[in-house]
Amino acid sequence: MLRLVTTSLCLYCQRAHATPLLLTRPRSVIVQEENPLAINALYDLSVDISKVRKPRGWVLRQSPVYVSETAALLRDMGASGPVIARVLELHPEDILCKPDQIEAQKKLWMSVCTSQKDLVGIIEKFPASFFTSSSDHDNQKANIAYFQMLHLNKRIISKLMASASQSFRRPIEQNEQMIQTLQKTYLDLGGKEDNMKIWLQKLLTQNPYVLLKLPDTLHDNVVFLRNAGFTGDELLRLFSKLKGFVTELNPESMRLTLSYSRETLGCTETELRQIVLQCPALLYYSVPILADRFKGLLTAGVSMEQIMETPTVLELTTQIVQYRIQKLRSFGYDVCSGSLEVLNGTKKDFEMSYVKLRFRQERPLFNPVATLRTKE
């Protein structure tokens, strides 16, 4: 059977066409009809059905559904009508969760959320993290207890659950193994026991997905960087600047990138390590990307010495660098004869620097012997 679905700007017309018109089609192809109860209940909540039908139309063909029950629970927690509609549009699978299952999730999440308002904010951004299978509940509960045992505060735990929910759905042993590896690495590099909790919290906040990586990956990367000459203290600083993304690297790609960077910059291994500490991006950018960025800077007239003094400029794409250099040159400022620091930072940072430089370049000089104009 084949469904013919028509749409209209009028909500009443949309409801009228919610029950599909069926046309004859070969019996070998069977298309299940949409559940009219689900459609009508979603319309009552001002949900845009087209946003549900296109990516996850299968949800609308399920039965039973719990649209009103899900909406009521969210409303009781303080969610507004528009918020409820957005949640159901973003993750329509919510309507398949049984009320008792949602209540159990609410109780679990409130053990790490400071208020129902905070939980509603999480659900609005990460509905898939809240509306999970009942089979995940035991693992979630065990992992919450484990992270509380580590004395991580509620805000950190709730953020981990929201942004990296997979790590809370898997067996606790896997998270324990990664956390223990991180702790051992920190202490082996010379970190202080008293500061370990703060270091761990910062690392997990910066990159929650670090929990999903293999402990061997972290070990291999540390060994490589140690062999490259970095001291324990330097590695702790480097990990801090990498913001937890050290597990995204691998020895072979780092070897190629460091070799290319040293050859291109014409520096010693000691100088290269200091450059990497200033610009950790050198570790994870591929050789083709770095080659393009070096070429762009050199073509613009920037010297290799300037790049070595301000290596963080390599974190910017060639297009951004060219645009910023051109904009600075438009009022007569030539970065090639000064520091590249003015090019760095976010778009907002650059705009502020640009305004300050332009004002400094264009403001009139004060003449102390000129006659002052006064009102007569």
Image: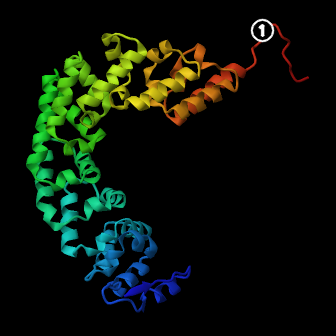
Q: Which residue is drawn at 20% across and 20% down?
A: 226
Looking at this view, name the residue that lies furthest to the right: 376
Looking at the rendered structure, the secondary structure element under dot 1 is loop
Q: Residue at x 52, y 31 (%)?
A: 318
Q: Look at the image and tell me in which quarter the N terminus lies.
A: bottom left
Q: Which residue is drawn at 29% across and 61% down?
A: 128
Q: Quadrant of residue 184?
A: top left
Q: Look at the image and tell me in which quarter the C terminus lies.
A: top right
Q: In this view, does 284 lie to the left or right of 370?
A: left
Q: Residue 135 location in percent, x, y? A: 13, 65
> From the viewer's perspective, is residue 118 above or below residue 54?
above
Return the residue nearer the eye: 109 or 351: 351
Return the residue nearer the eye: 98 or 167: 167
Confirm whether residue 74 shows in the render. Answer: yes
Q: In this view, does 275 lie to the left or right of 50?
A: left
Q: Residue 168 location in percent, x, y? A: 18, 53
* Residue type marked 1: Pro
Q: Give the labeled residue for mark 1.
A: 368
Q: How crowded is mark 1: few (under 14 residues within 10 Å), some or many (20 or more)?
A: few
Return the residue nearer the eye: 193 or 341: 341
> From the viewer's perspective, is residue 185 above or below residue 88?
above
Q: Residue 44 location in percent, x, y? A: 42, 81
